Image (cartoon, helix red, strand yellow):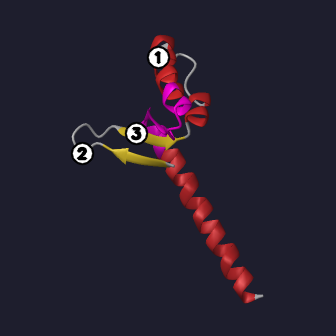
Amino acid sequence: MSVVVQSHVTKEIFLLCKGADDVIFDRMAADFDTTVFEATRSQVNGYANIGLRTLVFSECKLSQEFFSQWHADVRLLLLLSEEVHVLELMW
């Protein structure tokens, strides 16, 4: 699950994600600090090994340009899907 949020103070935009460790870890940036990554993965695996269910959280700062384009694309897709739904109802 993911959500996009904007800081009221700094106006920075972030993508926040939560999910299974293997899914989130697979999507992490290649330049992420490997020491922190390995320590985190080790702790999460330790919890899983004793039978605990684990979830991890991640964040990614989005540029205003990237967010604006993504938002426009999503709005267009929603409008198109609504038009398709209306056409389906007509037939």
Question: As shown in the figure, which amino acid type bears the numbered disc 1?
Answer: Ala
Tell me the number on the disc at residue 8. Answer: 2
Image position of 34 (left or right of 77): left
Image position of 91 (left or right of 36): right
Instruction: Say which residue label 1 marks.
Output: 39
Residue 28: give x, y in percent of width and height. Answer: 55, 27
Label 1 element class: helix
Which-is-in-front pick, marks 2 and 1?
1
Residue lying furthest left: 9
Question: As shown in the figure, which amino acid type bears the numbered disc 3?
Answer: Phe
Mark 1 vs mark 3: which is more N-terminal? 3
Q: Which residues, given as a range, are shown in magenta?
A: 46-67
Residue lying furthest bottom: 90
Image position of 20 (left or right of 65): right
Residue 83: give x, y in percent of width and height. Answer: 65, 74
Please tell me whether residue 9 is drawn above or below residue 31 in the rendered image: below
Instruction: Say which residue label 3 marks.
Output: 14
